[in-house]
Amino acid sequence: MTNKQLKKYIKKQAMAVEVKDFSSRILERINQEPHLQEEVVITKKHLWNLKPILISTLALMTVIIMIFAFYPDPVVPTPTEGVVLENLETVVALSSVQTTSLINVLDTDLNQTSSYTLLRFGPMERNDKIRDELADLSRYLETIEKLYSSNTDFDVVDEEVQTNGYARRMRFRTRDLMNEEDDYEIQYNQTINQTTKAFMIQGQIRIGEREYEMEAEGIVGQKGLLMRAQKDEFNYVILNYHEEDDRYTFEVELIQNNISIEKVTITLVMEDDTRVATLSFIEGESTGTYTFRILTEDNQRIISIHYAIDFDGELEEGDITIRLLQLPSSTIYSIVIKPEGRVPFTITRGRVITGRGMNPMGMI
Amino acid sequence: MEQIQEIIRELKMKNYTHFDTFYLLTKQQVFFTIVGIIKDQSLAEDLLQDTYMRFLEKIDQFKEGGNPYAYLTTIGRNLAFNLYHERKKVVQSEEIFETISSPQEPDDPSDDILELLNLLDLEEREIVTMHVINDLKFREIAGIMKKPLGTVLWLYNKAMKKLKQEVGEIHDEQTT
């Protein structure tokens, strides 16, 4: 039974259920409600009421402004020597991987992102939209590679230092599907509001020769973090992490030239001792949901994805297999798309790993 | 849909001449929205009426050309959840769902749509109801449920798999 048949079946069954006709009873209730009756009396407008409202509003605003202007904040955040990121180190590491890999492409790739506006989708239009979505998805493949290939704790070392005006340093290491390593370093200062336990860290993420300013905030002891990493003040990535019921969720927003261009959520759950990542496009041109797994094929690791894309109310599912293809001068992604019930097709895309120089990102 | 929009224009003028038609065209969707949450036919019928009363009270806020099913669904859902939270004990009884009358053969669970939907979790049931029965788009559902679109798609996908398995199994048994 296809989804379409099942939908038709559910709809038919639902429409066959007898729902009583309460329209007369509702009309009776309407008749008992004077405000639902046709108005025949024109009430006098009390324009004179505006003056006291205006005066009281102005008075209230003045009081509020006075409070904000002259009442000092009783608790000022202070630098602290404790480790505010305790239990959040791996989250910070993974967040840094995500944000830096995205900043990396902010000015190189977005002219090749999706731009689909068709409302009717035939098989060819569907394939074109999937191609467009994969252009957007490829931005996140570095994160996926590193998430699945690195040690679970990213070998994080967080320590006190005194370098470049920063009091702390966090180092961590990632691996990708080809087992190549990248070293990250975050130099940062931290402050904490001792009353609210709200902390803020501010510093720099360094990967290879690239450096990005970053800041993050959260509450000590709570499983949440808001991070912003920027290329410059107009181009940056915001990441909001929270954990609930062993479900780790990262909401990631890309800002280009001060305009939000894409929002995704990446959730991580453990299923049968396997880490499963799901990426969903929330805002932007892409709309699909992609569930990632890493499989081994001929001693090589491949990315296996199950996708679901809404084509104007029709949900299409399928599988995508991504293999790394080594060319003489670069490594690219070879992507096989198998839509359910339709003919498979293949595309290739460039592979970019932050801090190792740029490969072409466009479709080859 | 044009007929519904036309009646809504009349209702905005407090002209209820065609309210019965409006009710007839929308009651199924509102009922399933509510009963999927509170699982009690009698309470669902009460809330069904309250939903239409609230709809008429707030009709000025309904934007011309908007989706009336989405608007009614939102109102019905809010009322149902208010009651759901007040009467959690009532909801805990899964048996209540089975008391709702259905014109189909009672021996075949796949033919009882309410029983079939009861196989789903609350969120899954809501999404299937809103998309399949109420014809709402996933983006509209995401807005109503205040959930990311991806989560809605993912839950829908999961729900349809469950239902497909159930309906498929029963139909396979019937054919063998």
Image: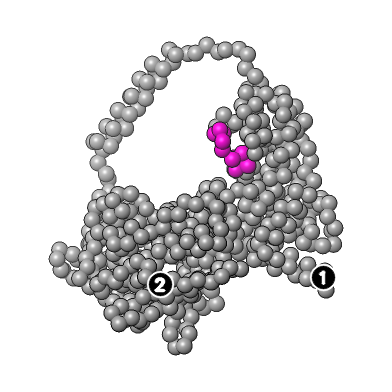
Report the disc number at residue B175.
Answer: 1
> Disc 2 residue type?
Thr
The picture places residue B54, in percent across and down from the top left corner, at 63, 34
Q: Is residue A103 left or right of residue A296?
A: left
Above or below, comparing residue B38 to residue A80 in the picture: above
Judge left or right: residue A309 versus residue A164: right
* Residue at the spot 40% in from the left edge and 64% down from the top edge: A135
Residue segment shown in magenta: B62-72
Amino acid type of the residue tagged 1 in the rendering: Thr
Q: Return the chain for callout 2.
A: A
Residue at 64% in and 66% down: B161
Q: Residue at x 52, y 48 (%)?
A: B143
| Contact check, label 2 and label 1, Cβ < 8 Å | no
Left or right relative to B12: residue A243: left
* Dot 1: element: helix
Residue A319, above or below B5:
below
Q: Quarter holding the C terminus of chain B?
A: bottom right
Q: Which mark is residue A348?
A: 2
Separation of marks 2 and 1 at Cα, in angstroms: 45 Å
Give the percent coordinates (x, y) of residue A258: 30, 49
Please state the horizontal and vertical placement of residue A19, each as a whole percent of the image. 77, 43
Q: What chain is tagged by disc 1?
A: B
Closer to the camera, B89 or A144?
A144
Can I make out residue A143 in this image? Answer: no
Secondary structure of the residue carrying numbered label 2: strand
- The foreground one among A50 and B75 is B75
Count residues near mark 2 (Cα–Cα under 10 Å), then give few for <14, some for 14-19, many for 20+.
many
